[in-house]
Amino acid sequence: REDLQRISAAGQLPSSDEQRKLQTWIEQAAARNPDVKGASWTMMDARGNQLARVPYEAKTVGKNYAYRDYFNGKGGLPEGTPNIKPIEAAHLSNVFVSTATQDRKVAFSVPVWSVPQSAAASKSVVGVLSV
């Protein structure tokens, strides 16, 4: 969470070292949960940029998917819609066509919350994990 929080706060895509660390984390999470039979796992930052994916797909990692329902929970929005906020609760998406496979899919997604720096600080969504 701390890495994702730092990346989201920076407002830019992660360095190659940060991306490798997130990719390793999501690969390990998928391996630890073989009972989750998802076609893919993805991690996005708070702006909807895909940071990691299992299986890895170079044509999707680094692209923005904030317009997708699994990220925003508001249905399909036009690509390029500005200022899209991430979900704040677990969500089952509408059907969408995968950029990686062209298959129709649905995704279960959950927000990833920040780690408050103090008791007075409020938490915020720093990313979205989807399967």
Image (tube, grey):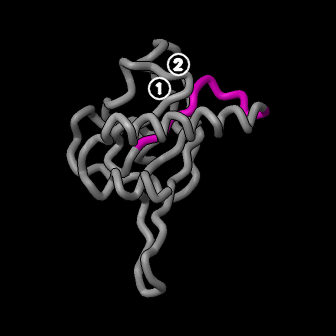
Q: Which residues are magenta?
A: 35-44
Describe residue 39's horizontal placement relative to residue 21 as left or right: right
Q: Quadrant of residue 76?
A: top left
Q: Earlier in the sequence, mark 2 or mark 1?
A: 1
Residue appearing at x 43%, y 76% in the figure: 117
Does 56 appear above or below 22?
Answer: above
Q: Amino acid at mark 1?
A: Phe
Residue appearing at x 33%, y 31% in the figure: 62
Quadrant showing the C terminus? top right
* Rendering coords of residue 20 (x, y %): 44, 34
Does 85 appear above or below 31?
Answer: below
Residue appearing at x 45%, y 19% in the figure: 57
| Tag 2 near tag 1, CB within 8 Å | yes
Q: On the image, numbered disc 1 is attached to which residue?
A: 96
Does 26 appear above or below 117?
Answer: above
* Rendering coords of residue 3 (x, y %): 43, 53
SS at circle 1: strand
SS at circle 2: strand
Q: How many marks?
A: 2
Describe residue 113's horizontal placement relative to residue 16 as left or right: right
Which mark, residue 84?
none
Residue 74 visible in this rendered orientation of the protein: no
Q: On the image, numbered disc 2 is attached to which residue?
A: 104
* Rendering coords of residue 121 (x, y %): 41, 81
Describe residue 28's horizontal placement relative to residue 2 as left or right: right
Give the farthest residue toward the right: 35
Residue 39 falls within the magenta-colored stretch: yes
